């Protein structure tokens, strides 16, 4: 058998073909998995909202939950005065060399396992959309990473330990429902606080006119506070 050292070097074209067959094919598989799971997430979210509405049907109708499909890559859940936006990115990502996922045995055994699709969960105030307050703030409360084998983990302030189960956790309807329930609970638990007096004691005429006309002074759940000090419960 001819020694590999005596084999002719691969041409650039050979390298391109090899990369297309391996890396690009894997990325396409990851995309398909992520899109499949995002479609499942939409169905589970819709079902969960209906289940919750059935439990609160005899309470104030203004706290009724609503679901809206915002297109191929987005879904929305209105939860009382909050809105959760679920957004799937159309691209596939690799982690930087210092990220914890690169240090797991699962990824070290096969680097291709680290390519992931991302589904992000954002929390906004529902009034921000109702009154078109385009400067209002929303917060990323969690990110779901899904790879070629449908393994997943959720990134959030308290959820990095889920990375330990990346090699065994398989995304499915049950896991998605758990993630959704935690996201909804977090949004309800994450209250709007009064901004510090010094941050709002001066306003321009333009700001006040905008407020009078449309209520558009910037609002966010932690306006004037450091969001990083809060614990994300995902």
Image (cartoon, grey):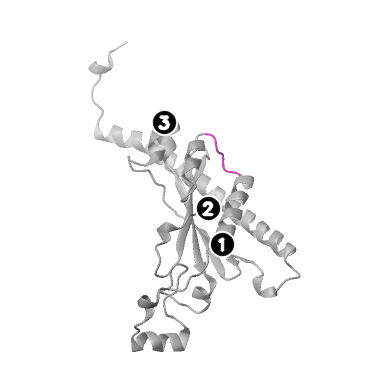
Provide the residue span drawn in magenta: 168-172
Question: Which residue has dot 1 on it?
Answer: 189
The nearer-to-camera label among 3 and 2 is 2
- The CA span between labels 3 and 2 is 30 Å
- Taking the spot 61% from the left edge, 49% from the top edge, the residue there is 178
- Does residue 66 show up magenta in the picture? no
Q: Residues within 10 Å of mark 2 (few under 14, many from 20)?
A: some
Query: Can you give x and y, in whole percent of width and height, for residue 52 in the image?
Result: 69, 61
Residue 110 got which mark?
Answer: 3
Whether residues under marks 2 and 1 lie with C-beta atoms below 8 angstroms apart, the answer is yes
Q: Report if residue 36 is visible in the image.
A: yes
Q: Earlier in the sequence, mark 2 or mark 1?
A: 1
* Horizontal relation, residue 218 to residue 7: left or right: right
Label 3 vs 1, first from the N-terminus: 3
Q: Is residue 87 above or below residue 212?
A: above
- The answer to whether residue 71 is visible is no
Foreground residue among 232 and 7? 232
Question: Percent position (x, y) of residue 54?
Answer: 74, 63
In the rendered image, the quadrant that contains the N terminus is top left
Image location of residue 202, percent across then percent down: 34, 83
> Which residue sits furthest top?
1
Residue beneath the point at 28% across and 35% down: 13
Q: Secondary structure at mark 1?
A: helix
Q: Is residue 154 left or right of residue 43?
A: left
* 171 in the magenta segment: yes
User: What residue did someone put label 2 on?
Assistant: 233
Earlier sequence position, callout 3 versus callout 2: 3
């Amino acid at each position: 058998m001819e020694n590999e050292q005596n084999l002719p070097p691969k041409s650039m074209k050979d390298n391109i073909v090899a990369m297309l067959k391996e890396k690009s094919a894997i990325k396409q598989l990851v995309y398909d998995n992520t899109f499949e799971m995002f479609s499942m997430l939409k169905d589970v979210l819709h079902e969960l909202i209906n289940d919750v509405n059935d439990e609160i049907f005899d309470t104030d109708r203004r706290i009724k939950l609503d679901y809206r499909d915002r297109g191929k890559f987005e879904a929305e859940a209105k939860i009382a005065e909050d809105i959760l936006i679920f957004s799937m990115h159309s691209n596939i990502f690799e982690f930087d060399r210092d990220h914890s996922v690169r240090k797991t045995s699962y990824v070290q055994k096969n680097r291709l396992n680290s390519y992931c699709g991302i589904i992000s969960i954002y929390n906004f105030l529902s009034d921000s959309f109702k009154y078109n307050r385009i400067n209002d703030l929303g917060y990323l409360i969690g990110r779901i990473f899904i790879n070629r084998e449908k393994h997943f983990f959720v990134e959030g302030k308290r959820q990095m330990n889920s990375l330990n189960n990346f090699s065994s956790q398989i995304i499915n309807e049950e896991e998605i429902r758990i993630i959704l329930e935690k996201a909804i609970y977090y949004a309800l638990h994450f209250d709007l606080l009064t901004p510090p007096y010094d941050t709002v004691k001066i306003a321009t005429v333009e700001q006040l006119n905008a407020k009078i006309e449309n209520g558009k002074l910037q609002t966010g759940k932690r306006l004037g506070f450091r969001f990083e000090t809060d614990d994300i419960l995902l």
